Image (spheres, rainbow, N blue to C red):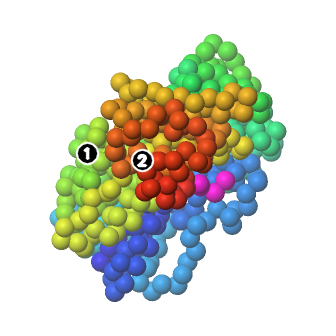
Amino acid sequence: MDCVVIGGGVAGMQAALSFRKAYSEKTVTLVDNESEVGYYRTLLPQFMNRTLPENKLFFWQDQDDPRFTIISGVRVESLERENRALVLSDGSQIPYRRLIIASGGRPVIPPVCGAAGIAGVFTVRSLTTAREARVWLPQHPEVVIVGGGLVGVKTAAYLASQDIPVTLIEKENHLLPQALSSQAAQLAEEHLLRNKVQLLLGSTIEDIQSSSGSISAIKASGQWVNCRTLFVAAGSVPEVTFLADSGLLREGNLEVNRALQTTDANIFAAGDAVTIVERDNFTPWTWPQAAVQGQLAAHNLYLPAPFSLSCLSRVNAMNLHGLSLVVLGIPVEGAERCVYTNPAAGVYRELYQVDGRIVGGALVGDITNAGKLHWMMNIGDRIDTDFTELLEPRLETFAKMSPSCAKLNQRAVFLPS
Ligand SMILES: Cc1cc2nc3c(=O)[nH]c(=O)nc-3n(C[C@H](O)[C@H](O)[C@H](O)COP(=O)(O)OP(=O)(O)OC[C@H]3O[C@@H](n4cnc5c(N)ncnc54)[C@H](O)[C@@H]3O)c2cc1C
């Protein structure tokens, strides 16, 4: 097999499709644990609240390509590098000449939520679990979500939009702590409160109670809360357990260089599974980065001198059922923060700068010029313009700048919502 891809999420699927395009005479086989591949994981909250039908979840459909084989519902159990083969859960083996690992992440389950056999406890990661939750929810509408990161906040926003009572528990003192400053997060918090989501910030889940085998209540910060459906969205870790004996992991991480190559020259990796050993060990945890990385890994597979990833950012655009939000980069310690606010319009915009260069920021409530600000951050040049002026949500801002900036037409890439 010219190329084998592990994982049929966005990174793996993008890798397989890009490989077929770049190397049209070569064959690719993709293996995934789940029974379906090529769907928008990002849209699972809208699927669970029944506003999105299942057929709209898929970004890929089988094209009858004889050189592209998909093996689904089968887990890769181990990697035997000396034989260049994968051992699968059905007992078979697949040989490879080149391999791309795109096995994504797996949810972190706090021990208290992991009690076996209690019905009504779900993670938010796979279509299979989302289907179960979708069926369960209408009869069990008192929802608690553990974790106020991206997945928990999106799930809360979309369930609450359908008048499902939701309590959201976050251990930090503000929502989206990995992505936003407390000031930027405030608008997201107000948005959820307006949608009748109850927020328990600075709280952790301490205990759960069940009745007749189903979840009935949870205890957070000493307080019992009725709960008939519990979503665990307490973060993810790279899913690389099947590589434990492969010799590819360092301190449990699947490390790659900026060309996405592992320590084995025949093996590349992409998406949530990888740790890029540069700039404080970077794992993307975003859809756009996973897609770009899948594409690059595929192109690099047979190149004598692989290309490096040009952009390492966590930039991310989303809509929390009525609140637009763009994360340009996480708050940076030691950076100077410039802020634009318009509380009456529900707008908060901030940029982090070091030495006149944009190094992060967030736009909440109004994402005008997000694409241009992202572009300026990526090229990393010093900016002479007043940052506060840059932050004003006016399209003309960039027209006044250098001719090259005036010509810019980049847009923030929106995920379907
Ligand atoms: C509810 C939700 C909302 C999100 N919203 C956003 C958003 O708004 N914006 C954003 O940028 N990101 C968002 N994300 C994150 C984004 O979805 C991920 O960053 C992205 O899906 C990562 O893609 P991936 O291909 O690396 O991994 P995954 O999508 O996790 O795919 C990995 C695949 O590998 C398979 N696999 C794993 N191990 C094995 C094995 N041993 N054998 C075979 N197959 C295996 C898994 O079954 C899985 O299908 C969201 C995530 C969730 C869950």
The residue positioned 23% from the left and 65% from the top of the image is 306
- Residue 391 is left or right of residue 284, and the answer is right
In front of the other: label 2 or label 1?
2
What crowding class fits label 1: few (fewer than 14 Cα within 10 Å), some (14-19), or many (20 or more)? some
Q: Earlier in the sequence, mark 2 or mark 1?
A: 1
Mark 2, ligand 1, within 8 Å: the answer is no
Rendered image: mark on residue 277: 1
Query: Which of the 4 image quarters holds residue 295?
Result: bottom left
Rendered image: mark on residue 376: 2
Image vertical order of residue 162 relative to residue 348, above or below: below
Q: What is the x, y in percent for residue 313?
A: 40, 47
The magenta region covers 413-417
Rendered image: mark on residue 58: none
Q: What is the x, y in percent for residue 34?
A: 52, 60
Q: What is the x, y in percent for residue 390?
A: 51, 39
Is disc 2 placed on a helix, strand or loop? helix
Q: Is residue 80 magenta?
A: no
The residue positioned 43% from the left and 79% from the top of the image is 68
